[in-house]
């Protein structure tokens, strides 16, 4: 069966599965964050060790998202995603049985391995199943999913903890949800069957997919630098904002988690609005460096302001700034000159690899420095890194169809 445009209607099943996968990824990654206090007390660990529980997943993503590109070249995008989903799901379920820091950390390592294997295949599957004119719409939806996952974490993890009694039980239930997603992918997941092509055409489609050649593409390099700088800042704040609100603003665990939930809620609206505007305007660049500037302003206000209402406004600005670029970022990579489905997977793997390496280092370094300088000083000081995505995106060329209209304006002015 196919739609009137000649594309298979089954692509919408694939997109639903991608949505399920992305929500599960973010839930598993950040689930311990609202439970900082009970986890620290239960395992008798310090803030730096807790930061490692969160950031170790980013380190594994950095390593295995790169390796996933190599694995996918042999196994295909679907099998690579399935391998990752089952690894992540089982590890999350097993974390519900841990009673020591080392055992929990080991489970988190395998969760990170699974995450890393899963992160690039969805991009390849989107380019396989959907027409180029649909990419920007699908990227908008997929960008929202990460924030839906964060909303689940910050809105429902603490109530789940109170309902089941222990943080281990809360992790176990999230593992059950992840396994359900893996089962759905196993039953319904498909790679798009393409018509036979000549050896020359196949070789042309695959050429340039090696990491070295892809990273030399200017848009890939700039997007990688931008994503890495933004992840350095965002991951530090995502890991420590609830703890910051408890320590510096005198909030209890539930209130701190509820306030932090404004970040992903605003992020969901920001991702949607940024995606819609990217579609309507046909432009990418206006939704890259300007929203990175908003993220800088909002993150500074979230830890620098003390008035509760002002903090809420800052978190909303932060969330919008951290998310409104997602559609434009993914789409500008897909639209880069000379890009192919094989190169898209490799480009995403490279970008995620360096970006999540920064996401690993940020909470670890920040947690360690917080003991000497204080958490607030570290969170503010690290914001200098946010200048990297701002200037990297400024240097990026416009790729959207709206660029033709922009060129027409100065030409018309010259005629006059």
Image: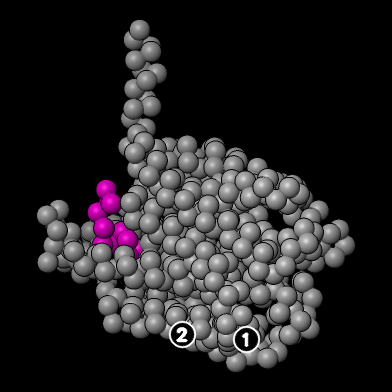
Dot 2: element: helix
Quadrant that contains the C terminus: top left
Q: Position of residue 410 (x, y in %)?
A: 40, 18
Q: How is the image coloured?
A: one colour
Please give left or right for residue 17 compared with residue 131 in the image.
right
Q: Position of residue 12 (x, y in %)?
A: 25, 64
Numbered mark located on residue 165 in the image = 1
Residue at position x 33%, y 51% from top? 137
Q: Is residue 125 found inside the magenta-colored segment of the image?
A: yes
Q: Count the labels in the image.
A: 2
Q: Which residues are magenta?
A: 124-134
Numbered mark located on residue 62 in the image = none
Q: Position of residue 6 (x, y in %)?
A: 14, 57
Q: Position of residue 154 (x, y in %)?
A: 58, 66
Mark 1–mark 2 distance (CA, rounded to whole Å): 17 Å
Helix, strand or loop: magenta stretch: helix
Numbered mark located on residue 176 in the image = 2
Front: mark 1 or 2: 1
Residue at position x 46%, y 38% from top? 285
Camera-side residue: 305 or 279?
Answer: 305
């Amino acid at each position: 069966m196919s739609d009137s445009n000649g594309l298979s209607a089954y692509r919408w099943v694939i997109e639903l599965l991608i949505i399920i996968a992305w929500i599960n990824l973010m839930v598993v990654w950040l689930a311990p964050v609202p439970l900082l206090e009970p986890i620290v007390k239960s395992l008798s660990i310090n803030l730096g060790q807790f930061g490692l529980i969160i950031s170790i997943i980013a380190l594994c993503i950095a390593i295995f998202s790169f390796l996933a590109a190599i694995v996918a070249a042999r196994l295909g995008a679907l099998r690579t995603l399935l391998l990752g989903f089952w690894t992540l799901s089982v590890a999350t379920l097993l974390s519900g049985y841990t009673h020591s820091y080392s055992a929990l950390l080991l489970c988190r390592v395998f969760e990170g391995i699974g995450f890393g294997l899963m992160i690039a295949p969805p991009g390849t599957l989107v380019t396989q199943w959907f027409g180029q004119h649909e990419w920007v719409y699908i990227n908008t939806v997929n960008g929202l999913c990460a924030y839906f996952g964060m909303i689940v974490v910050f809105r429902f993890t603490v109530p789940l903890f109170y309902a089941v009694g222990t943080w281990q039980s809360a992790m176990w239930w999230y593992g059950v949800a992840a396994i359900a997603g893996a089962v759905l992918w196993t039953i319904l997941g498909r790679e798009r069957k393409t018509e036979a092509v000549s050896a020359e055409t196949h070789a042309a489609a695959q050429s340039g997919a090696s990491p070295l050649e892809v990273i030399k593409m200017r848009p890939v390099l700039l997007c990688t630098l931008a994503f890495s700088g933004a992840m350095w800042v965002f991951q530090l704040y995502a890991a420590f904002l609830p703890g910051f609100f408890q320590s510096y603003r005198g909030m209890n665990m539930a209130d701190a988690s509820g306030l932090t939930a404004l970040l992903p809620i605003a992020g969901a609206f920001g991702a949607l609005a940024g995606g819609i505007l990217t579609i309507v305007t046909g432009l990418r660049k206006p939704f890259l460096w300007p929203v990175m500037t908003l993220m800088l302003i909002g993150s500074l206000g979230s830890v620098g302001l003390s008035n509760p209402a002002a903090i809420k406004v800052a978190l909303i600005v932060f969330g919008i700034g951290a998310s409104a670029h997602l559609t434009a970022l993914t789409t500008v990579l897909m639209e880069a000159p000379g890009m192919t489905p094989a190169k898209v997977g490799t480009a995403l793997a490279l970008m995620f690899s360096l970006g999540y390496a920064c996401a690993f280092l940020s909470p670890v370094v920040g947690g360690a420095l917080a003991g000497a300088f204080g958490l607030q000083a570290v969170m503010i000081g690290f914001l200098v890194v946010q200048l990297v995505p701002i200037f990297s995106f400024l240097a990026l060329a416009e790729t959207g169809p709206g660029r033709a209209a922009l060129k027409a304006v100065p030409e018309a002015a010259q005629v006059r």
